[in-house]
């Protein structure tokens, strides 16, 4: 091998060594950068999670954490429970809503309603309405009623007749068959026009038990109807209980 060839080969080998040495350094540097960015990303995630998460506690009952992107509108609390709600952040504190129980001494039914609501009974002697109970919130925005009807026909016929004979001017109307626990009934979800041309949003739930029709209604101006009102309505429907009436039929032998 000539001296010139030896020099050329040596130069090539050195270049290869330098290339792989630089390549190894670049690979190590890249790995370090990836690990560094991963550490920063995970660390930032933990920091931002603590910043953008909040903890909500209800008395000594329970607590939980959730992202601040979620909204908690209200918390329903049993009237026997402590209503102390704390939020570990400067977000708007959700409204707590206590519920009371209405029990009919003669009608054998009960339901729960917001304790802040005003509730009153009315009588309709000689009609198919056995019980009528009005309720409204303390701002007189949300109104509603609970009725018990005794009718000689089915629930579906009752609803058909009610819709046909109604003098209400509907903007929209939906009738949906809905089962709530052991109650098979119908939800009326509609918007009507008042005489002043103001639109009102309404939810009504009807179900039948032992030959009687039970009606739970809630309505408010459409612009003021909220998810809270809807939740309150379903809370009342879900809480509605009908006790079995005693069979008054006597048998002679």
Image (spheres, rainbow, N blue to C red):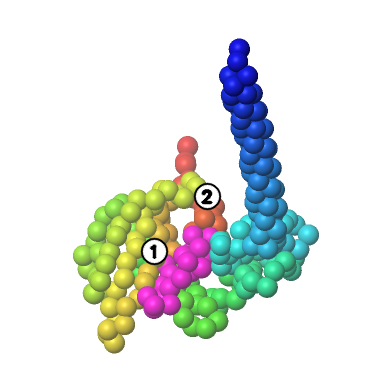
Residue 42 location in percent, x, y? Answer: 67, 49
Q: Is residue 22 above or below residue 187?
A: above
Q: Quadrant of the N terminus?
A: top right
Q: Dot 2 lies on which element? A: loop
Residue 14: % across, % down:
65, 28
Determine the residue positioned at 36% across, 54% down. Answer: 186
Label 1 sits on residue:
204
Q: Which residues are magenta?
A: 217-236
Task: Please name the predominant secondary structure of the magenta segment in the image.
Answer: helix
Image point 69% across, 69% down: which residue? 89
Location of residue 169 by image quarter: bottom left
- Placement of 140 over or under 33, stated as above or below: below
* Residue 223 is a magenta residue: yes
Left or right placement of residue 73 versus residue 127 in this view = right
In the picture provided, is 5 more to the left or to the right than 183?
Answer: right
State which mark lies toward you, 2 or 1: 1
Look at the picture and state if 243 lies above or below 204. Answer: above
User: Could you tell me which residue is drawn at 31 percent across and 71 percent down?
Assistant: 191
> Of 135 and 209, which appears nearest the observer?
135
**Quadrant of res 55:** bottom right
Q: Which residue is situated farthest in the top direction here?
A: 1
Residue 217 visible to the viewer: yes
* Rendered residue at 68%/73% (across/down): 90
For disc 2, the marked residue is 244
User: Tags 2 and 1 in contact by the CB under 8 Å rule?
Assistant: no
Q: Which mark is residue 55?
A: none
Of helix, strand and loop, which one carries label 1? strand
């Amino acid at each position: 091998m000539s001296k010139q060839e030896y020099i050329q080969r040596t130069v090539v080998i050195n270049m290869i060594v330098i290339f792989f040495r630089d390549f190894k350094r670049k690979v190590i540097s890249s790995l370090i950068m990836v690990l560094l960015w991963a550490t920063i990303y995970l660390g930032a995630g933990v920091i931002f999670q603590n910043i953008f998460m909040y903890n909500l506690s209800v008395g000594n009952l329970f607590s939980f954490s959730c992202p601040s992107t979620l909204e908690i509108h209200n918390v329903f609390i049993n009237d026997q429970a402590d209503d102390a709600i704390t939020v570990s952040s400067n977000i708007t504190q959700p409204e707590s809503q206590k519920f009371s129980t209405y029990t009919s001494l003669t009608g054998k039914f009960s339901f729960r309603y917001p304790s802040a609501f005003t509730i009153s009974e009315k009588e309709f002697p000689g009609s198919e309405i056995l019980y009528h109970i009005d309720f409204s919130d303390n701002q007189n925005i949300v109104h509603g009623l609970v009725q018990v009807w005794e009718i000689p026909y089915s629930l579906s016929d009752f609803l058909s007749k009610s819709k046909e004979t109604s003098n209400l001017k509907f903007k929209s109307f939906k009738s949906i068959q809905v089962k709530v626990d052991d109650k098979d009934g119908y939800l009326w979800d509609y918007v009507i026009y008042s005489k002043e041309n103001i639109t009102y949003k309404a939810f009504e739930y009807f179900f039948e038990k032992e030959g009687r029709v039970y009606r739970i209604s809630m309505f408010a101006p459409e612009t003021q109807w909220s998810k809270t009102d809807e939740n309150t309505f379903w809370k009342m429907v879900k809480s509605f209980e009908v006790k079995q009436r005693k069979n008054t039929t006597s048998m002679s032998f």
